[in-house]
Amino acid sequence: MLLVERDGIPRYKTCGGGLVGGSPASLPEGAKVEIHDEVQRVTLSMNGRWERTLPSRPPWAKMVFRSEFDAALVEEAARAGVSVRDQCAVKGVESTEDEVRLRVGSGEYLRARAVVGADGSASRIAKFVDVRCRQVDLALEVEVPVGSRLSKSWSGRALMEWGPFPDSFGWVFPKGDVCTVGVVGSRGSPDATRRYMRDFLERQEVAGIEPIHDSGHLTRCRAADSPLSRGRVLVAGDAAGLVDPWLREGISFALRSGALAGRAGASIAGSERGADVHSEERRYGRAVELGNEMTSSEQVSRIFARHPALVHTALTRVPLVWSRVDDYLTGRATIPEVLSSRLVRPVVSALAALS
């Protein structure tokens, strides 16, 4: 088995780096992931107004640097017997009924019985599979070193802010003496997203600090009928467009879909008949729906886009509503379970009726 990485390991990736939901439980046993902070409180805000800080019950969301996190997973894969080849960019994909050929930067071809594409939101494998997206957003992010005052202020506390225009969102995640600060907005509103980023950095008192990293990328959320495979080629995580449509969280989806794709890929690699390959494709497609979590999150996103102030009020002033959302953030419940709960369902129904 071969793991191909475009860049050298470790490598930076634009990402908030929050292990929320089912992420910690999905990690390989024994993976040495360094946790730089644990979120015990969450501040919710409406573009800098109506701030309210609420407790998050353990197990708390855990903060990581993606360079370290991804390197730890690669190390775990190597320990399990996987060969790792980094600084090896995939330039093209060819597939027959019996094998897949990857053309890499050196000009050579790598041959495989099955390929799992987990190469991010700009995935070349996704283009081959023809992944289609219903939502594409622009995320901007900096990682900034913070002094003792800001470090103490953010220790154990994250900020989640609803932005100034529809579908915009800002965050601050603490990681010891570094904070990850970013915003996201629709790809169709790049100027508004950049203005929001400048304002957000000013309000968080980090605008004048030289960042360790300053980056941006597109987050893509798959269409409900988008393919997840093409013959012996599968996609997972960001490459498949598996991202929470509301909060744009992707790590938990990547970990879970990656595990499912790995098992499906192993079965496909051992399949001699085309019918067996197609059967595994269908099985993977059914499994990776992940309990319709994206559909449920999209429902919340639509409601929030129409009534952001009402949703914010429900989250910050109705303790039982926040308690259920916190269950999602800390891995106690999925989004569908939160929406169908006795406490939240009437609120969601009332807001949907107003839409």
Image: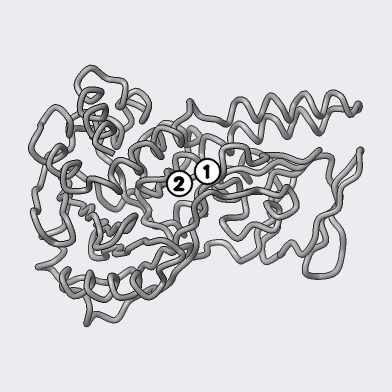
Residue visible at 48% across and 32% down?
29
Q: Which mark is residue 242?
A: 1
Quadrant in which residue 333 is drawn: top left
Q: CA distance from mark 2 to mark 1?
A: 7 Å
Residue visible at 52% across and 53% down?
220
Label 1: which secondary element: loop
- Between discs 2 and 1, the one toward the N terminus: 1
Residue 148's place in the image compared with 245, above or below, is: below
Give the residue pinned by disc 2.
250
Horizontally, residue 112 falls left or right of residue 56, namely right
Percent coordinates x, y for residue 62 in the rendering: 31, 44
| Label 2–label 1 contact, CB within 8 A | yes
**Three-letter code, disc 2:** Gly
Percent coordinates x, y for residue 150 in the rendering: 13, 66
Residue visible at 26% across and 63% down?
179
Residue visible at 66% across and 39% down?
228
Horizontally, residue 317 falls left or right of residue 283, namely left
